[in-house]
């Protein structure tokens, strides 16, 4: 009895957090839900339209294109950055003066504001005055990210790798540092190869940080906006237009609030679903069968 | 299996540093169970790592049998090592863990199966071979670590670095008994690092007592108890430790705060020549009560504790505080105690070293 009463009081302690979350997340989300099922012209003129907006959005071929591009982009990001991050983390110095230097250098791209990253690469990759652009053309390769959609894709991907691989490296590095020396010593005594050490000691011990790295990289890449918007503006054509840019155009540019709200919800659910799938997959990767 | 010889061995972690291990010369016999015993930071783990090859000694050589292994990396030394915390390969089954050292050496699959089954049976792991090693308890994990050393038939020695630290007390006994069984069956050279004297004394044939990078004494548990060669060995082994009192020596008597105590004449003679700070040492349990009409030394009783099967008495002899361990039956009621220091157990130390 006494215990139960105490628990009831304990719930009260959570109330402030519930209120904050309600104002910051739940109420805005419900507003979006509200918009997604109504056609709103003004404060006094609104009509319930049911699933009409959802049907419109799901039939929109421009959005299909953006969604496919978005999946290809996020998949590329994960396939490049996760292995690259692990590989570079393994190359990092384990102790000594080099550690701090490497950590500071790695942290730099993460500290640059996202639209500035876009600006840096816009200049850096320009075929007429940009260092990289001029260099690539100097090699005899015809490269122009504003005119060629493959070049544009390539530039956006390289930019994202530059911007975010550090995060994966730092996470993996922290994970590797947490492995006690005894594991490496035991592996030497057991005659394990370098590959076996990676496969049976380092990779299993990195599972936790890799889960975080995959989730963060998936979520961030799936809602990427500022960098490609500044770099290519979504072009040439709409070859680098990703979901969040399409959404912004729809909501702010065309003021189609109903379809934009329906689309936001679908967008949100996709991220939620995939994050959950990644979470379960990695967590169950080596459960007892 | 091999004899381990430490030839003029010494180690500094970097040139100009103090010795982490003082120069030493030892031979450990093939098939012996040795315990390295000492307080934290005494160099026992450094010595173990030099034997396993994880640390290269800065001076001297390590020999397994006739072979000089000083420059060989651990994987070429044919040793097994069990660490303080269980080291297992998380994602593998118990079977795969045990098979790992053999598979890395490209052994035949049938041979691997046969060895793993044999060792697992010996260690009592045969029922869990197909389970994932990660899901087992700490004691089973330590058995797996041990098993990874034992599966290799060419293994020369198995080294243990405080392997029972994370094991529950009631399982420690079982695991230690298992270790003794394995030792008897395989007749392997075992080296066991610990700071727990009970563990060292119950495990080992020979105990190597270390302090500040120095080996103070190598001896059987009995020798360490009866004739500690250094005052530290006296303090460290036994509970409570040995009593030490500053003394002077005249003829064949040691004089402690005016009391004359008979000692071995040859020892007294040697002590007079040794000079330095002289101390008389005696084990609390080897002091006995004086019989009536027997000349004894009178101690002033300060405290008496009943510790179950014996009484521990704290008493003063002049400036010195002594511990005396008496049987339950030998009840003392007064606040003084008349005792005898038997000549064969009263040892003299000059500058902390046993006088011989």
Image (spheres, coloured by chain):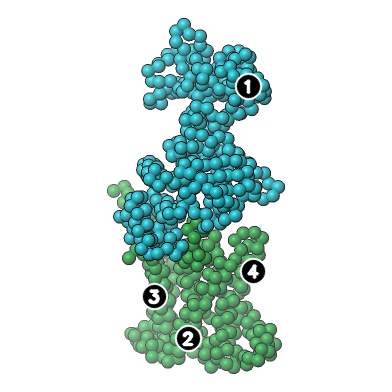
The alpha-carbon separation of the residues under discs 4 and 1 comes to 69 Å
The alpha-carbon separation of the residues under discs 4 and 3 comes to 35 Å
Disc 4 target residue:
A105
In the image, residue A150 above or below residue A191: below
* Left or right: residue B89 compared with residue B299: left
Colour seen for chain A: green
- Where does residue B307 sit, x and y in percent of width and height? 41, 26
In the image, residue A154 above or below residue B108: below
Which of the numbered marks, if any, corresponds to residue A69?
2
Q: Could you say whether the residue bearing mark 1 is in a helix, strand or loop?
A: helix
Q: Residues within 10 Å of mark 3 (few under 14, many from 20)?
A: few
Q: Could you say whether the residue bearing mark 4 is in a helix, strand or loop?
A: helix
| Residue A63 is at least partly visible in this image | no
Q: Residues within 10 Å of mark 2 (few under 14, many from 20)?
A: some
Specify the quadrant that holds the C terminus of chain A. Answer: bottom left
Q: Could you say whether the residue bearing mark 2 is in a helix, strand or loop?
A: helix
Tell me whether circle 4 and circle 2 mark residues in contact (CB < 8 Å): no
Lower sequence index among marks 4 and 3: 4
Confirm whether circles 2 and 3 share one chain: yes
Q: Nearer the viewer, residue A220 or A130?
A: A130
Confirm whether circles 4 and 3 share one chain: yes
Q: Residue at x 61, y 69 (%)?
A: A106
Disc 3 target residue:
A273
Colour seen for chain B: cyan
């Amino acid at each position: 009895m006494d215990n139960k009463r105490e628990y009831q009081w304990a719930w009260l302690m959570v109330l402030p957090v519930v209120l904050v979350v309600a104002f910051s997340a739940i109420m805005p989300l419900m507003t979006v839900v509200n918009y997604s099922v109504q056609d709103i012209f003004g404060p006094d003129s609104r009509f319930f339209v049911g699933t009409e907006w959802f049907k419109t959005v799901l039939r929109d071929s421009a959005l299909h294109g953006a969604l496919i591009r978005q999946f290809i982009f996020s998949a590329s990001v994960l396939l490049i950055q996760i292995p690259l991050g692990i590989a570079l983390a393994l190359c990092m110095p384990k102790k000594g003066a080099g550690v701090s230097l490497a950590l500071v250098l790695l942290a730099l791209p993460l500290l640059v504001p996202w639209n500035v990253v876009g600006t840096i690469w816009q200049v850096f990759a320009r075929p007429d005055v940009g260092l990289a652009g001029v260099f690539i053309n100097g090699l005899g390769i015809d490269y122009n990210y504003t005119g060629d959609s493959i070049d544009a894709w390539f530039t956006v991907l390289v930019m994202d790798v530059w911007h975010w691989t550090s995060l994966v490296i730092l996470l993996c590095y922290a994970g590797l540092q947490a492995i006690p020396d005894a594991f490496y010593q035991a592996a030497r005594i057991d005659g394990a190869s370098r590959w076996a050490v990676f496969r049976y000691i380092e990779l299993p011990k990195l599972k936790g940080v890799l889960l975080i790295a995959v989730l963060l990289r998936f979520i961030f890449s799936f809602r990427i906006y500022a960098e490609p918007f500044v770099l290519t503006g979504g072009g040439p054509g709409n070859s680098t237009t990703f979901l969040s840019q399409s959404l912004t155009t729809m909501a702010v540019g065309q003021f189609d609030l109903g379809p934009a709200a329906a689309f936001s919800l679908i967008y949100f659910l996709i991220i939620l679903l995939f994050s959950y799938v990644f979470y379960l997959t990695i967590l169950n990767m080596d459960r007892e069968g | 299996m091999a004899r381990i010889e430490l030839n003029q061995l010494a180690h500094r972690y970097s040139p100009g540093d103090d010795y982490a291990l003082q120069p030493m010369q030892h031979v450990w016999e093939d098939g012996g169970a040795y315990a390295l015993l000492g307080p934290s930071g005494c160099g026992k783990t450094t010595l173990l790592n030099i034997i396993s090859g994880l640390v290269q000694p800065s001076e001297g050589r390590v020999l397994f049998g006739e072979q000089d292994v000083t420059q060989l990396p651990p994987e070429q030394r044919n040793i097994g090592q069990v660490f303080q915390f269980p080291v297992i390969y998380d994602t593998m089954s118990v079977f795969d863990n045990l098979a790992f050292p053999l598979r890395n050496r490209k052994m035949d699959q049938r041979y691997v199966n046969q060895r793993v089954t044999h060792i697992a049976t010996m260690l009592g792991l045969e029922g869990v071979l197909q389970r994932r090693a990660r899901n087992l308890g700490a004691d089973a994990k330590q058995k797996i670590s041990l098993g990874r050393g034992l599966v290799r038939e060419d293994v020369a020695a198995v080294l243990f670095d405080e392997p029972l630290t994370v094991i529950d007390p009631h399982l420690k006994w079982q695991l230690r008994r298992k270790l003794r069984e394995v030792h008897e069956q395989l007749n392997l050279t075992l080296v066991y690092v610990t700071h727990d004297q009970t563990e060292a004394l119950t495990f080992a044939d020979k105990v190597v007592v270390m302090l500040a990078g120095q080996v103070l004494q190598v001896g059987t548990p009995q020798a360490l108890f009866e004739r500690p060669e250094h005052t530290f060995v006296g303090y460290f082994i036994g509970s409570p430790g040995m009593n030490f009192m500053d003394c002077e020596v005249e003829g064949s008597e040691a004089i402690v705060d005016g009391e004359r105590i008979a000692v071995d004449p040859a020892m007294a003679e040697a002590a007079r020549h040794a000079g330095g700070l002289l101390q008389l040492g005696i084990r609390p349990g080897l002091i006995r009560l004086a019989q009536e009409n027997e000349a004894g030394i009178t101690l002033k009783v300060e405290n008496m504790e009943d510790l179950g099967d014996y009484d521990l008495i704290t008493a003063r002899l002049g400036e010195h505080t002594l511990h005396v361990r008496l049987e339950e039956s030998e009840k003392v009621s007064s606040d003084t105690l008349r005792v005898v220091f038997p000549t064969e157990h009263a040892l003299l130390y000059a500058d902390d070293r046993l006088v011989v």
